[in-house]
Structures are given as C-alpha cells and as structure tokens.
Image: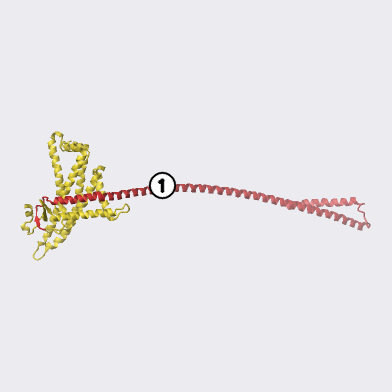
Amino acid sequence: MGLTNLLSTPTLGIDISPGVHPQVHLGPLTIDVDIVWATLIAAAVVITMGLVLRKKATNGVPGKFQLLWELAVGAVQKQVDDTIGSRGAQVVPLALTLFVFIFTCNLFEVLSIGSTYDWLPAPTSDVNLPLAMALFVIVLVHRAAIKNRGLGGYVKHYFSRPFPPKLFFVNLFMNGVEELVKPVTLTLRLFGNLFAGGLMLSLLASLVIWKLGPAPIGAVLSVPFTVIWKLFDMAIGAIQAFIFALLTILYFDTAMAPDEEHQKSGEVING
Amino acid sequence: MPLATSNFLVPNGTFIVVLLAFVVVVWVIAKKVLPVLNKALTERQEQIRGELEAADKAKADAEEADVERQATLEQARVHAREIVATATATAERTVAGAEERAHEAAERIKQAAEAEVANARQAAVEEVTVRVGEIVLAAAERVIGREIQAADHQDLINEAIEAVRAESATGAAAGAAGARQ
C-alpha cells in the first residue's frame, strides 16, 4: 500500500490510486470484476473476428479482413520458420493468439480517460492477465523441452551448461534463475508498459487543475497531450504484443533446439 | 458493487478467470480459425502455382508455334520462288517456240507466194508465146500476101517462140532478183 500512497502525493493536489477495482469474493478468491469483463470482451472480440474469418475465408481473392489475418499469420509463421524451423509449427497458433489477443487488450487503453476507475480498462494493465499468459507459455515451453530431451535430458540440461559439469551447482543456480525470471519478465514487461500508459493518462487528466490565475492552461493542454499520448500508447500496445509473441517463439526455440546446438553454444561461451 | 483498493502488483483470483478466458481464445484460434485460414492459403498457393505453370506452358507453346510458323513461311517463300522461276522458264520457252514457228510459217508463205508468182509468169509467157506465134503468122501473111501454112513453116515459128521464151526467162530471173532485194 506504500506505493499506492506515494502516488497520491498531497503536494500535487491530485489523487492517483492504482489498484482500485470493483471486486467480488468467491470463497478465498478475490476477483476484480472490471478486469474479468474487459478480458471477456477482448476474448469475445478476438473469437468473433476468428469466426467471421472462418465463415468468410476463401481461397480466391481475399477481402481486406482476411488479408489482415493472413498478414498476421504470415508474419508469425515466418518468425517461427526463421527461428525454430519446421519443428516449430505447433507454436504458430499460440504465438498468433498471443499477438492478436494482447494487441486487442492493449487497444482498450484508448478508451480510458485516466479516471481512478475505468469501466473498460485494458486487461493487460492489470498484473493477472499478463501473468496468466506468461505462465501458460512457460508451462508449455517446459513441456516442449521435456518432450525434446526426455525427462533425464531436461534435468541434466540444468546442470551441464553453460560451465563444465564439475561446476554443476553454479550451472543449476544460473539456469534456475534464468527459468524463473522468464515468466516474471514476460509478465512485468507487458503489465508495466500498459500500467504506465494508464498512469500517464491519469497524470494528463490531472493536468486540468493547473491554472495561471483564471486561465485554465492545464485543461487546454491536457486534450492535445492526451491525444498524442494515446496515439503513442497504441504503438506501444502493438510493440508489446509483438514482443510477447516473439519472446514466446524464442523460448520455444531454446526448448526445442537439438542438444548439440546447446553443447556448441556452451563451448563458445566457455571458449 | 463495492470498490476496493488492492496492491496492483499482487495477482489475485482474477488470475484463474482470465487464464481460462485466454485458454479458450487459444483453443478457438488453434482449432477453429487457423486450420480454415491455412487451408485457404494452401489452396490459393496451389492455384497460383497451377496458373503460373499453365502460363509457362502457354508461353512455350506460343514460342513453338511461332518457330513453326516461321519455318512454314520460309518454306512457302522458297516454294513461291521455285514456281516463279519455273513459270518464267516456261514462258521463255513458249515465246521462243512461237517465234520459231512464226518464222517457219512466214518462210513457207513467202515460198508459196514466190512459186505462185513464178507459175503465173510461166502461164503468161506461155500465152504470150502462142499469141506471138499467131501474130507473127498473121503479119507474115499480110506481108507476103498469101496464107502461110503453119505446118509448112513450123520450124520458123518454133524458132520465134524459143526466142520469146529465152527473153522471158531472162526477165523472170531479173524480176525474182528484184523481189528478193
């Protein structure tokens, strides 16, 4: 709560308090209803777009809508082919969904006006959704690694690199930290960017209290600033969606890479 | 619905609900949307490949047809030249034959005409000879005052006739030479 209080500094004369949600309690669980419905709406939007495409998809001349989907699929497919190769075909649906879904969620921030509590916040600006997606991805990455190397190879992998096996405890520590950090960074990168975007909108909204005598300078400035920031925020949303999908592909690449490659890269590091 | 403030860095029960929502989205995209889209993409690629192949084939066919057309055209030109050459030779031969035949015919006509002229002259000389004999006899009767028997003086008459003939033959030869010139 300390951080929350820090942001509502009395000297600014404004109160920006993140973490305010309409909540319900289901047994031990606390559920932020606004995040849930924003997520459901984003999911409905993506699913509807998918089903519309399913109905409209043609092998003839594609419409603009299909072309947009094909563009996204083509980009993800190319990324997967370039990094993982043909083994990575199973990653394409996940990476594509991540990109489209996160991008859709991020766009919700355009609707935000920077009030204490938005009716339709970007669900990615709450820690739960990024964490859910990151853990989902990481679990699948580890499953792919076990499938690739076998359980023994998977465990051995933690001890045998990047240093020689006699330094296995150092290896275990380094690999353990790396694997633990992956979902945390994946979560915080997305959440942090979107959360900061929301805070920025709140700050711009609070600009209206700035007056020079009777002249409402802040109120006049906050409108163009907000417009510019929202445009910028949309670009951030696209970039963050892309990065999340790209990192997912790269994590799968590491997990699915043949062992020899790891040996080689280990030797290079040792050399 | 009560508004509550919680630490925004700590996940709560929302996590489970949004995870389920996300899994549903992944499932729909992976199972229902992507296969259809990929099928459309693959089919279109096949279609385009087929069309490109057809276009290549059509181009090759067109080139082949063009080569064939050129060859046929060249053949036709050679053939035409041969026909023209043959026709020219035939025409020349025909003209030469016609000229020869015309010369022959003219020669024949000239010879016939000359023969006719010679015959006519001969007939005229014969007639003149007979008349001269008669006139000579009549003149001699008057001169000598009595009738001369033709039989009695046959030698004389024949001599006169021969003289006339010799003279006419000389004249005919001179006339023929003049006609040739």
Q: Colour of chain B?
A: red
Taking the view exactly as shown, the residue that stands out farthest to the right is: B146
When the figure is inspected, residue B151 is found, relative to residue A266, above or below; the finding is below
Quadrant housing residue B124? bottom right
Camera-side residue: A191 or B122?
A: A191
Quadrant housing residue A6? bottom left
Say what amino acid the circle numbered 1 marks.
Ala
When the figure is inspected, residue A9 is found, relative to residue A258, above or below; the finding is below
The chain identifier of the residue carrying mark 1 reads B
Asked whether residue A240 appears in the rendered view, the answer is no
Left or right? Give the position of B92 relative to A128: right
Q: Colour of chain A?
A: yellow
When the figure is inspected, residue B104 is found, relative to residue A263, above or below; the finding is below
Camera-side residue: A9 or A159?
A: A159
Image quarter (top left, top right, bottom left or bottom right) of the N terminus of chain B: bottom left
Camera-side residue: A188 or A22?
A: A22
Under tag 1, what secondary structure?
Answer: helix
| Image coordinates for residue A20, horizontal then vertical, percent | 10, 56
Residue at the spot 84% in from the left edge and 51% down from the top edge = B163
* Structure colour scheme: by chain
| Image coordinates for residue A103, horizontal then vertical, percent | 20, 53
Taking the view exactly as shown, the residue that stands out farthest to the front is: A27
Taking the view exactly as shown, the residue that stands out farthest to the top is: A166
Tell me the crowding category of disc 1: few under 14, some 14 to 19, or many 20 or more residues within 10 angstroms, Cα based.
few
Taking the view exactly as shown, the residue that stands out farthest to the bottom is: A214
Residue at the spot 13% in from the left edge and 41% down from the top edge = A176
| Image coordinates for residue A239, horizontal then vertical, percent | 19, 51
Residue at the spot 17% in from the left edge and 47% down from the top edge = A134
Asked whether residue A174 appears in the rendered view, the answer is yes
Left or right? Give the position of A260 relative to B54: left
Left or right? Give the position of A10 relative to A112: left
> Residue beneath label 1, please?
B60
